[in-house]
Amino acid sequence: MRLENRTAIVTGAASGIGRAIARRFAKEGASVIVSDIVEAPIWAPSNDDLPTTETIENEGGKAEFVQTDVSSWNSVDALVSGAVDKYGRLDVMVNSAAVFEAANILETTEEDWDTLMDVNLRGQFLCCKRAIMQMMEQELIDEVRGRIINLSSQHGMIGPPDYLAYAVSKAGVAQMTRQLAVDYARHGIMVNAVAPGRIITGTHPGEPDMTDPDLPYSRSRTPFPRLGRPEDIAGAALYLASDDCTYVSGHNLLVDGGWMAY
């Protein structure tokens, strides 16, 4: 129960990594606000297709769903304000909402670029800004007013072939994480990121039965004998959200099975 009596918002929590983080936080005692553009999983195995809130409640946790468009300030403001109205404070903000596209610059339209930047970068900017506004007003718990965990990516640290807009958006998240940590650590706000490697999320058709044509390459580049699972990212996020994380800020924590060490 490492998050007992804590309130956490997890964006992009209907499916995949965000869903795993929300479930893990709830198991550790947090009151979780499940935020996404839709409530039902976009894609899930047939034995795990309930909305995240229902799954959490079935597991004995506390959660509620709030529909949110992270690219809209009004939507993000309502998300945070509602959480604070109900629970009194915001202890953890997890920015997991993202969209994904594999394309080089010639294949990337202006609309594609704008969509990825709106959700992946602008969305995290707005959520971070609103969370910091709230956390600055809160009393310290020990030495911390609040914790922000962004989802960056190993793709934001290298030049992966044919992932232009996605990689640029995630590189922006990594740098924003460092900048916010520098600006707000003195105020007791800890800002870190988790940078996943290749994670089999179940959020895209084909992934649950491992038929993605890129999987052989991903396996060949990953020293660990399997690819990642959403639960691997949830464990890293739990550490960054918990009181075990006491002197870490501005860090992009790679969870990639050793890919970047290769």
Image: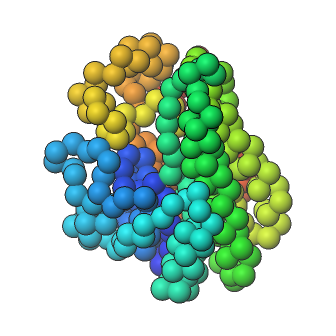
Q: Quadrant of residue 173?
A: top right
Asked which colour scheme the image uses, the reply is: rainbow
Q: Is residue 15 above or below residue 26?
A: above
Left or right placement of residue 157 versus residue 31 in this view:
right
Above or below for 85 versus 44:
below
Q: Residue 81: give x, y in percent of width and height.
A: 57, 79
Task: Please give left or right for residue 7 compared with residue 164 in the image.
Answer: left
* Percent coordinates x, y for residue 183 in the rendering: 83, 60
Q: Is residue 73 left or right of residue 66?
A: right
Q: Is residue 43 above or below residue 70?
A: above
Of residues 42 and 115, which is closer to you in this image?
A: 115
In terms of depth relative to the viewer, which is nearer, 9 or 233? Answer: 9
Q: Residue at x 42, y 58 (%)?
A: 37
Residue at 59% x, 62% y is: 72
Quarter of the figure with the N terminus: bottom left
Residue found at x 52% / y 72%: 79
In the rendered view, would you say 62 is above or below 228? below
Where residue 119 appears, x then y in whole percent?
57, 49
Residue 120 picture location, percent across and down: 59, 46
Please, which residue is most extreme toward the front here? 110
Residue sitting nearer the eye, 54 or 59: 54
Identify the residue at image location x=62%, y=42%.
114
Which quarter of the image is occupied by the C terminus? top right
Q: Determine the image quadrant of residue 117.
A: top right
Residue 152 appears in the figure: no
In this orientation, does residue 129 appear?
A: yes
